[in-house]
Image: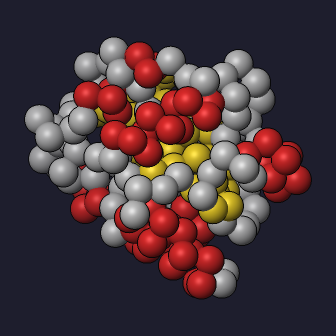
Amino acid sequence: MNSLPIQRAGRILREGGVVAYPTEGVFGLGCLPDDAGAVARILAIKQRDPAKGLILIASKVAQLQAWIDLPDAGTRLSNDAGPPITWIVPPSDDLPLWICGEHAGVAVRITSHPVAMALCDAADSALVSTSANFSGRAPARNRHVLRRCFRDLVDCIVPGECGPMQMPSEIRELTSGAVIRAGML
């Protein structure tokens, strides 16, 4: 993995930009969680209802600590075995309202994708991560589709491939374990 595109994308994120990048299942659109303008831009690009909320990804639990209220997060959020899972957890009082939407919890995932991990590290932050698609349409899993649809709408497309999942991650409620959205390899 070439670090120059990652470092450039990290700088763009810190400056308020929006980037597209590969994740475990699909290409994502991302920005810093506390940047209201960048989040609004992602919602406008996707034509997404803000009430649906957004997912935060991180390369390590420490990047999520400011956004969640989960004292034992380090042990409870790890995805050491099996496919990645996005967990619904209690938000911190500092979490911007635009992240949760109409939901009481916040969706978070410790990413296992090397590009997404490096991007979180380059931005020194958890990232908003939502699938690169227009509302109601299939997410981009192919770089050509991503470029055709989003090249003029984002500030940077980070090189890399999606995988190994074939769709977005499973979403579960942490306390009950209830499946909110099924995932699949």
Applied colour scheme = secondary structure
Residue drawn at point x = 76 percent, y = 24 percent: 137
Residue drawn at point x = 70 percent, y = 34 percent: 133
* Whether residue 108 is visible: no
The vertical placement of 160 against 81, above or below, is below
Residue drawn at point x = 12 percent, y = 47 percent: 71
> How far across and how far down the image is residue 96, in percent?
24, 35
The vertical placement of 85 against 6, above or below, is above
> How far across and how far down the image is residue 159, in percent?
72, 68
Residue drawn at point x = 34 percent, y = 61 percent: 125
Which of 143/105 is in front?
Answer: 143
* Whether residue 150 is visible: yes
Which of 67/69 is in front?
Answer: 67
Q: Quadrant of the C terminus?
A: top right
**Residue 178 placement, left or right of 61:** right
> How far across and how far down the image is residue 184, in percent?
69, 35
How many numbered discs sit on the rendered protein?
A: 0
> How far across and how far down the image is residue 115, in percent?
60, 68
**Residue 148 placement, left or right of 84:** right
Q: Quadrant of the N terminus?
A: bottom right
**Residue 115 placement, left or right of 39:** right
**Residue 173 placement, left or right of 156:** left
The vertical placement of 106 against 63, above or below, is above
Q: Residue furthest right?
A: 144
The vertical placement of 51 against 129, above or below, is above
Which of 104/133 is in front?
Answer: 133
Which of 184/115 is in front?
Answer: 115
